[in-house]
Image (tube, rainbow, N blue to C red):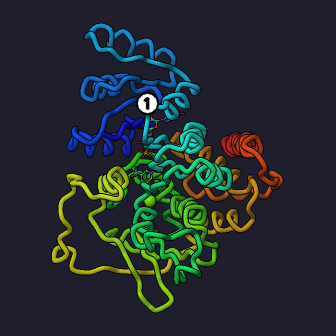
Amino acid sequence: MLNITVLGSTGSIGKSTLDVIARHPDRYRIIALTANQQDELLFEQCKQFRPYFAVLLDESAADRLRKRVVAVGLDIEVLCGKEALVRVATLPEVHAVMAAIVGAAGMRPTLAAAEAGKKVLLANKETLVLAGHLFMDAVRRSGAVLLPIDSEHNAIFQSLPHDYAGDMQQSGVCKILLTASGGPFRNTSLSDLQNVTPDQACAHPNWSMGRKISVDSASMMNKGLEVIEAHWLFNAAADDIQVVVHPQSVIHSMVQYVDGSVLAQLGNPDMRTPIAYALAWPERIESGVAPLDLFAIAKLDFTTPDFERFPCLALAYRALRAGGTVPALLNAANEVAVAAFLDGRIAFLDIPRLIEAVIDEVPRQEVYQLQDVLDADTASRVAALVWVEQKAK
Ligand code: NAD
Ligand code: MG
């Protein structure tokens, strides 16, 4: 039995995780489920999975959940707040943590799980973007097992040698080929991009995901964050990570070797595949995903990314090369920009404009400790909010 905490269980990744776990009641036991404020869905999940702990960030939502849990006689401790997230990620009886909170809010409990030496199933890419150095150090020091959930990184993990120890040259790897669907606006002209709506941005052609990552996919910031994520996970330099636009989302990424071989992982675009892979690693379990029908797909296309229409991708490469706190500045500015776009306060093409203005304005610092990252995150959010206010005038 693997005892598991699911951080962000009410989200898109969280629900897919529970879907896979429900297929294997003999292998997994849920210790804790957590959400921001969705107490109704969390209650349904509590009834089905009977965790020992349920955590809500929001206090009134936690009160509502506590009453409901008592009313039906469930023996579940309902907790509230950020410290409770850290607590359920580090409990001694927990073997594995699914890190599926969205945004910088997921960093502290994810980092805490790594420091506690857990098996970390990492969906929250923002942790690596913000604090990649600190997080990877924590994994090494504690002996935590790190398994990427992001479909591309999971594919790369599967395509690298099993004993890959972070040295590309020694393993005969020359490039990481990170595939990108191109998102809903792959063929939209720059002038039409000016007027796209949040709903259009969230209508991803291949994947069903939360709204924040959907907008990131539309702007290609998601791919930019994934370049930074790949850098930390696989110790790959920016120049060794190449983005390949592949609209069918069948090849989830590839690894190119010095002898000319390219290894890829293929599958239907359904997050239950990487989730099942990470849950059972190094074994394989059934995930509920339909087998890939190559004849129905018939053909696979590949093109280079358009950095002019998708400046977020170039900004992410720039942040990775700059290092220090610049990726944290990029991430926070992006979170503010995406929220403002979803609220109808700024236009889609303002997202990269805002991010560029913020990383030009807020000075770069070195990262020695977590506080340096948190300070950069705050400074970036303040500058980004000022930018939004001025724009809205
Ligand atoms: P989502 O918005 O669907 O779900 C987010 C979850 O986090 C919810 O359970 C929500 O209640 C919780 N949450 C939100 N804000 C919180 C806060 N401040 N404190 C505590 N909990 C909070 O997001 P998602 O699409 O499932 O994405 C989750 C993470 O996985 C993101 O980092 C995303 O980049 C990554 N990811 C998602 C996908 C996907 O297919 N959805 C694929 C790859 C990576
Ligand atoms: Mg991805």
Judge: label 1 CB < 8 Å from ligand 1.
yes
Nearer the observer, 89 or 102: 89
Q: Secondary structure at mark 1?
A: strand
Which residue is rendered at x = 53% and y = 67% of the image?
191
Rendered residue at 56%/74% (across/down): 241
Look at mark 1 in the image and give the residue it sits on: 34
Q: Quadrant of residue 245?
A: bottom left
Residue shown at 60% from the left, 71% from the top: 236
Q: Quadrant of the C terminus?
A: top right
140 or 41, nearer to the observer: 140
From this view, report whether residue 166 is shown above or below residue 171.
Answer: above
Q: Name the residue nearer the viewer: 76 or 347.
A: 76
Q: Which amino acid type is marked by label 1?
A: Thr
Answer left or right for 107 relative to 184: right
Taking 372 as reference, is 356 above or below it?
below
Residue 18 image point, x, y percent: 30, 40
Residue 186 location (% of width, % of height): 43, 69
* Crowding near the residue tagged with mark 1, few <14, some 14–19, many ≥20 C-alpha atoms within 10 Å: many
On the question of residue 197 being in view, the answer is no
Q: Is residue 362 above or below residue 168?
A: above
Q: Quadrant of residue 167?
A: bottom right
Residue 353 visible (yes or no): yes
Q: Is residue 392 left or right of residue 157?
A: right
